[in-house]
């Protein structure tokens, strides 16, 4: 059995703005709930709080998901992709993930011809 490599935050590949995209997924049914961005500090805060903490690109500030709405995301596990430039965080979602009141931010479907 191959031993897993220990990965540090500094090993991850952040974009030119110091951000990395993060896919949030329900830990029980694997539903994709949302996509947001983190920087090194928000990853550290997420690890410490065991709740998701993101960097708001529009407001230029940190935000803990659920701090205002009560719809917290409790971190169950964190994965990184093969290029080390995207994170996947599996969470226990309290309430809904989307600010529209939907469970997931991915509720709009593009209609493709022939499908």
Image (cartoon, rainbow, N blue to C red):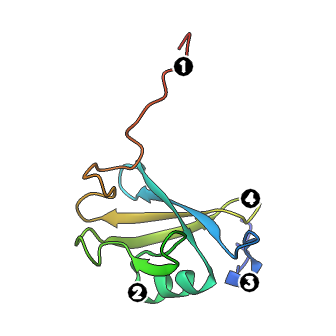
Residue found at the very far front of the displayed protein: 59
Could you tell which of marks 4 and 3 lies nearer the N-terminus? 3
Could you tell which of marks 1 and 4 lies nearer the N-terminus? 4
Judging depth in this view, the residue of 55 and 47 nearest the camera is 55
Q: Is residue 1 above or below residue 33?
A: below
The nearer-to-camera label among 4 and 3 is: 3
Q: Is residue 111 above or below residue 114?
A: below
Contact between labelled residues 1 and 3, with CB atoms less than 8 Å apart: no
Residue 49 tag number? 2
Could you tell which of marks 4 and 2 lies nearer the N-terminus? 2
Q: Residue 60: horizontal and vertical position, in percent?
A: 52, 78
Q: Few, some or many C-alpha atoms within 10 Å of disc 4 (few <14, some 14-19, many ≥20)?
A: few
- The Cα–Cα distance between marks 4 and 3, rounded to whole angstroms, is 16 Å
- The Cα–Cα distance between marks 2 and 1, rounded to whole angstroms, is 41 Å
Contact between labelled residues 4 and 1, with CB atoms less than 8 Å apart: no
Q: Residue at x 47, y 81 (%)?
A: 62
The nearer-to-camera label among 4 and 2 is: 2
Q: Residue 101: horizontal and vertical position, in percent?
A: 24, 52
Judging depth in this view, the residue of 90 and 24 nearest the camera is 24
Residue behind mark 4: 82
Q: Residue 48: horizontal and vertical position, in percent?
A: 46, 89
Image quadrant for the N terminus? bottom right
Judging depth in this view, the residue of 17 and 26 nearest the camera is 17
């Amino acid at each position: 059995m191959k031993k897993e490599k220990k990965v540090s935050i500094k090993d991850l590949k952040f974009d030119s703005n110091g951000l990395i995209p993060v896919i949030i997924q329900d830990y029980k049914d694997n539903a994709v709930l949302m996509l947001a961005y983190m920087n090194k500090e928000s990853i550290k805060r997420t690890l410490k709080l065991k709740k998701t903490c993101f960097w708001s690109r529009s407001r230029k500030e940190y935000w803990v998901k659920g701090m205002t709405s009560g719809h917290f995301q409790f971190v169950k596990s964190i994965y990184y992709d093969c290029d080390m430039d995207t994170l996947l965080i599996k969470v226990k979602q309290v309430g809904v993930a989307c600010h529209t009141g939907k469970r997931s931010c991915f509720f709009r479907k593009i209609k493709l011809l022939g499908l």
